[in-house]
Amino acid sequence: MEQVLVLIKPEGLQKAIVGDVFSQFVSSDLKLAGLKLVKASDQLAKAHYALLKDKFFYWQIVEYLTGKFHDGLPVVAMVFEGRGAIAKCRRIAGATNPEEAGPKSVRGKYGRITTKGLFENVVHVSSSTDEARREIALWFRKSELLQ
Ligand code: ADP
């Protein structure tokens, strides 16, 4: 069955919006297979964004994930499972650029572009089945996921 990694980035806890964001994903028909808080290390954030290392915003997104911009807070890491899980979760998240995201999507509701030009867009959602597999292995042990 298709799995997807969903992260609520550190501003979720800082802005106290984790409850609403979580409920938007969990009220889909997908099964929640994993859930935990993770204080992302520099190493984990770099590995997570390894494919974007040539982008001009790479260092900012690595620091963003580690909580550097949000009081050192952790990420809420989740795995959802089910038919079309990636497309469903990406629809709930909305477009990468929060200004282009639908008004009822998570990023449309809560995202912003910072004065330094970072898309502070609240959630990460894997973009393909290969990426989901790679990312889930970075964030979760097998024993932490429901079978
Ligand atoms: P997504 O998270 O929607 O899959 P990407 O993997 O392309 O998007 O980008 C990773 C993260 O980098 C985004 O979630 C966002 O926080 C940030 N980002 C992406 N594109 C830009 C950009 N053009 N300017 C600033 N930040 C960006």
Image: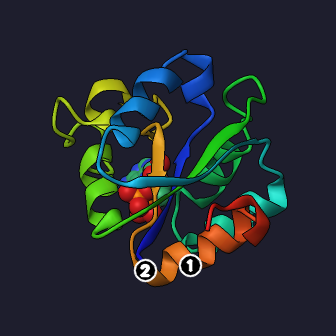
Would you place residue 76 above or below residue 136 in this image? above
Amino acid carrying label 1: it is: Arg
Image quadrant in which the C terminus is located: bottom right
Q: For the residue carrying disc 1, how many other residues have a C-alpha within 10 Å: few (<14), some (14-19), or many (20+)? A: some
The image quadrant where one finds ligand 1 is bottom left
Q: Is residue 37 left or right of residue 99?
A: right
- Residue beneath label 2, please? 129
Q: Which mark is residue 133?
A: 1
Locate residue 21: give its quadrant: top left
Is 41 drawn above or below residue 106 in the view shown? below
Q: CA distance from mark 1 to mark 2?
A: 6 Å
**Residue 65 at x, y percent in the picture:** 66, 46
Tell me residue 125's x, y (percent): 44, 57
- Please, which residue is most extreme toward the bottom here? 130
Mark 1 CB lies closer than 8 A to ligand 1:
no
Q: Nearer the viewer, residue 50 or 33?
A: 33
Q: How dense is the environment of label 2, judged by Cα within 10 Å: few (below 14), some, or many (20 and up)?
A: some
Q: Give the x, y percent position of residue 108.
A: 26, 32
Give the residue at x 50% y 77%: 131
Give the quadrant of the N terminus: bottom left
Is 27 on the left or on the right of 20, as rendered?
Answer: left
Q: Is residue 94 visible?
A: no
Regarding residue 138, the answer to whether it shows in the image is yes
- 76 sits to left or right of 91: right
Under 8 Å from ligand 1: the CB of mark 2?
no
User: Looking at the image, do the residues carrying marks 1 and 2 touch, with CB atoms under 8 Å apart?
Assistant: yes
Q: Residue at x 46, y 43 (%)?
A: 123
User: Callout 1: helix, strand or loop?
Assistant: helix
Mark 2 is on which residue type? Thr
Find residue 118 and name its label.
none
Q: Is residue 55 left or right of residue 142?
A: left
Task: Give the number of marks.
Answer: 2
